[in-house]
Image (tube, rainbow, N blue to C red):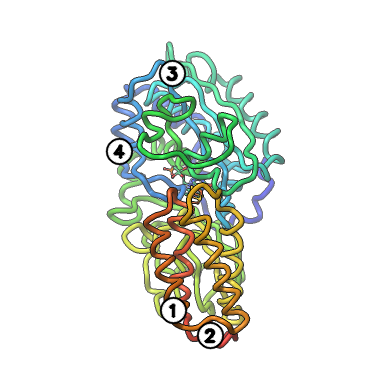
Amino acid sequence: MAIIKESIRNQITFSQIPFGEGLKKGVQLTPEELIKVVRDSNIRGRGGAGFPTGMKWSFTAAAKGDKKYVVCNADEGEPGTFKDRVIFSNWAKLVFEGMALAGYAIGADEGIIYLRGEYTFLRKELEKQLEEERAAGLLGQNVAGKEGFSFDIHVHMGSGAYVCGEETALLEALEGHRGEARNRPPFPATCGYLGKPTVVNNVETFAWIASILVKGADWFKGLGTEKSAGLKLFSVSGDVERPGVYEFPFGITVEQLLKEVGGEGAKAVQIGGASGHCVPASNFNRAIAYEDVATGGSIMVIGPQRSMLDVLENFMEFFADESCGQCVPCRIGNSKLLEGVRMLQEGECTSKYLNELCKLAETMQIASKCGLGQSSPTAFLDIVKYFRRELFSGQAF
Ligand SMILES: Cc1cc2nc3c(=O)[nH]c(=O)nc-3n(C[C@H](O)[C@H](O)[C@H](O)COP(=O)(O)O)c2cc1C
Ligand code: SF4
């Protein structure tokens, strides 16, 4: 479909991977051997949390269940993230094949794509390509010629809440309930969709698995850093000359990345979406990797003309709005932080009260029930730490 090709800015490895090849290779292995390849590649999930994919698949393979599921998390609700949309627009079949490989590895015959509600425009084309995969024998009965292995995929439209990207809230939404995070444990690997063992992975993770089967675990492991193997897609937006989707190895510094995208004059970069870290210019030598600044791929570049207070107000409005309200630290905490930012805007927040809000933010990080409330105060704390003077002046400088 290639409808968003213009936003691809450099050579992306997925373009070199022939459709079907990874899946055909994978089903020649035993499920155990396939999981070993995934483990050996050291790939970590590309959705943000960075959990080792091989480990997740082996837990789900070992879990007892008469039925298991593979779920593709295509909610892509993190502000500043659009790389999954571009993957689906150009290399959807690699995602389907990664899902089928997961099915083969864990013993599942059904895959579900949970597609962000705003991506309805992709649905028809995805369904057309699923049909092509069936016609090519890469979905359905005896997938890729593997006797006895059946696997098929359908698309489920998301209903619009950011929290539904959190995997357990996503499963609730899939089951037709209100999208609210579950208590963990149990984890989806043992008790997921309809209470059955379920693998939930990000769109990009599945596409890399299909690529790893073609190019080899050593190839992937040899790229990136020790704890953050491989290449990563980044959605770059904001005050840059060339916004779009880029592929870089993990370990690239913020400075190197800014040079590639034409954002050298930035005063800060928000890495990992609104819930990620805000890195000021003085720290642009930091590496983008799980060892340093982690990310699911969102890079929002903040130019010198921007008010950090406006940036922060925008983030906190988002979180106050998107908190599902289930737990107090997140429901009340985000509203209080937003109120504090507005007090700063009005010149009515004292330094002492701002310190109190920072304590509240730290409490939210440890006491919130799910990742939304645990990560929503991160940018608040970073911006207060690095831009305190600017926050009190109310002026960008
Ligand atoms: C509030 C919130 C939103 C999330 N949104 C997404 C999302 O849109 N896409 C995604 O893949 N993971 C998202 N995640 C992470 C998922 O919970 C989960 O870790 C991920 O889908 C696992 O896939 P991976 O291991 O391949 O990264 C979100 C987490 C939280 C807390
Ligand atoms: S942290 Fe926020 S989003 Fe998560 S359960 Fe609590 S209120 Fe809901």
Percent position of residue 351, x then y = 46, 83
Relative to 224, is 118 on the left or the right?
Answer: right
Q: Earlier in the sequence, mark 1 or mark 3?
A: 3
Quadrant of the rendering where the N terminus is positioned: top right
Amino acid at pointer 3: Lys
Provide the secondary structure element on which disc 2 rests: helix
Provide the secondary structure element on which disc 3 rests: loop
Q: Earlier in the sequence, mark 2 or mark 1?
A: 1
Q: Residues within 10 Å of mark 4 (few under 14, many from 20)?
A: many
Along the viewing direction, whichever of 287 and 55 lies nearer the viewer: 55
Q: Earlier in the sequence, mark 4 or mark 2?
A: 4
Which residue has dot 3 on it? 67
Mark 4, mark 3: which one is toward the viewer? 3
Percent position of residue 179, x then y = 56, 40
Q: Earlier in the sequence, mark 2 or mark 3?
A: 3
Along the viewing direction, whichever of 243 and 52 lies nearer the viewer: 52
Q: Residues within 10 Å of mark 1 (few under 14, many from 20)?
A: some
Q: Residues within 10 Å of mark 3 (few under 14, many from 20)?
A: some
Q: Residues within 10 Å of mark 2 (few under 14, many from 20)?
A: some
On residue 39, the disc is 4
Amino acid at pointer 2: Phe
Which residue has dot 1 on it? 386
Above/below status of 106 relative to 257: above
Provide the secondary structure element on which disc 1 rests: helix
Mark 4 and mark 3: span between their CA atoms? 24 Å
Mark 1 and mark 3: span between their CA atoms? 50 Å
Amino acid at pointer 1: Tyr
Mark 1 and mark 4: span between their CA atoms? 38 Å
| x 29%, y 27%: residue | 33
Which residue has dot 2 on it? 392
